[in-house]
Amino acid sequence: MSLVLLVMLIVMFALEPILHCFGHDEGIIFNEHCVEGDSVLFPYSVISALALFCYFGLLIDLAVFSTRVSAFVLVIGRLLAELMLFIFALVFFMLAFACACSTLEQDDPDFAGIPKSAMSLMKASLGMMGGEHYDYLTNYPALFLFVVVYVVATVVFLLNLLIAQLSCAYSATFQDMVGLARLNRCKIIYETIPSVSPKRWTRFVESLRLDERVEFGEGDLGITGGIQVMEPSNLNITTQDQIKRFGGSTSQEAVWPEEAGGDDEEDRFERMEKLIEKAMKRMSKGAKGGKSGTAGGSSSMNSGGESGGGDEEGSASKSEGE
């Protein structure tokens, strides 16, 4: 785009009406309306309009400041290919029917020749042809049939096909458009950095203060090489600290302390679960032993007092042993 803009500016300088009016300015400074200047005024105006399009095309790079806008611009670029296919098919249909209508035996002034026929068909596609033109076409049945077929093929078929193409292309691009927007931002930054002076780049890097530690929280210093971004405290609530802290020296040469197995929360949970299982087993065994002891005591009481007393002492000693 920059190269095209440069070429257009050179052409504009060559076609400048003021330069062509030098020596024929009739005493007016920077006169652009003379016989020589009027002859190049129209091409100069066309080239200047195209140059303005180039300027605005270069401004599209500013969309990288917003990821959402940049993604939207990239989607438009991806869908332009489908739009160009539609325009190509429309022009092909237009030329085909314009040539066919020109060969018919008819005296309609709107279809007198290929250029006028193509212009009339384009108006029909864009909905710019008035009703009186269609009424006049009824005087020529063959021409009217050709125009109806053209309208159905372009307005009904091609336009709906364009909608389907755009929908499929957008759904395929939508999944990756944010990532593509970020890649495009990186590409523009990579292309822009060489044009930045070393002094300005050094001042920018120093302003980032990447050598300072970033705070995870108030008084909680983290690592270097990051940029701190503040957020509301209730945005990401964490009830459990994910940072493992160790006391001692902060020297980089110091050995990283080994994690104690007893301090691990998962290990403590497993130990607690095992203790609960053991307690449940003991309770179940105690309940079974109590039932058997009660049944034995009743039978011994029925058989005799002495044997019952001995059983009670034995059960008591057994329970004490347990």
Image (cartoon, rainbow, N blue to C red):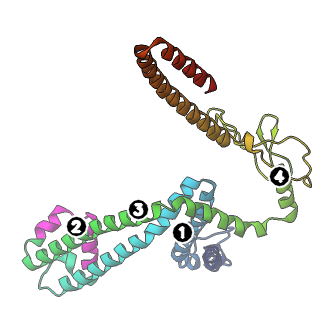
Q: Quadrant of residue 243?
A: top right
Residue found at x 86% / y 55%: 203
Q: Nearer the viewer, mark 3 or mark 1?
A: 3
Q: Amino acid at mark 1?
A: Ala
- x, y percentage for residue 33? 58, 71
Residue found at x 61% / y 79%: 11
- x, y percentage for residue 104? 14, 85
Range shown magenta: 117-136
- Picture layout, residue 222 above or below residue 88: above
Kindly identify which numbered label has been placed on residue 171. Answer: 3
Determine which residue is flagged by label 2: 156
Determine which residue is flagged by label 1: 49
Q: Magenta-highlighted stretch: main secondary structure?
A: helix
- Picture layout, residue 295 above or below residue 63: above
Q: Nearer the viewer, mark 2 or mark 1?
A: 2
Q: CA distance from mark 2 to mark 1?
A: 34 Å
Residue density around tag 1, few if under 14, some if 14–19, many if 20 or more, within 10 Å: few
Kindly identify which numbered label has been placed on residue 210. Answer: 4
Residue density around tag 3, few if under 14, some if 14–19, many if 20 or more, within 10 Å: few
Residue found at x 37% / y 65%: 168
Q: CA distance from mark 1 to mark 4?
A: 47 Å
The answer to whether the residues at label 4 and label 2 have Cβ atoms under 8 Å apart is no
Q: Amino acid at mark 4?
A: Leu
Q: Quadrant of the C terminus?
A: top right
Q: Amino acid at mark 2?
A: Val
Q: Earlier in the sequence, mark 4 or mark 2?
A: 2
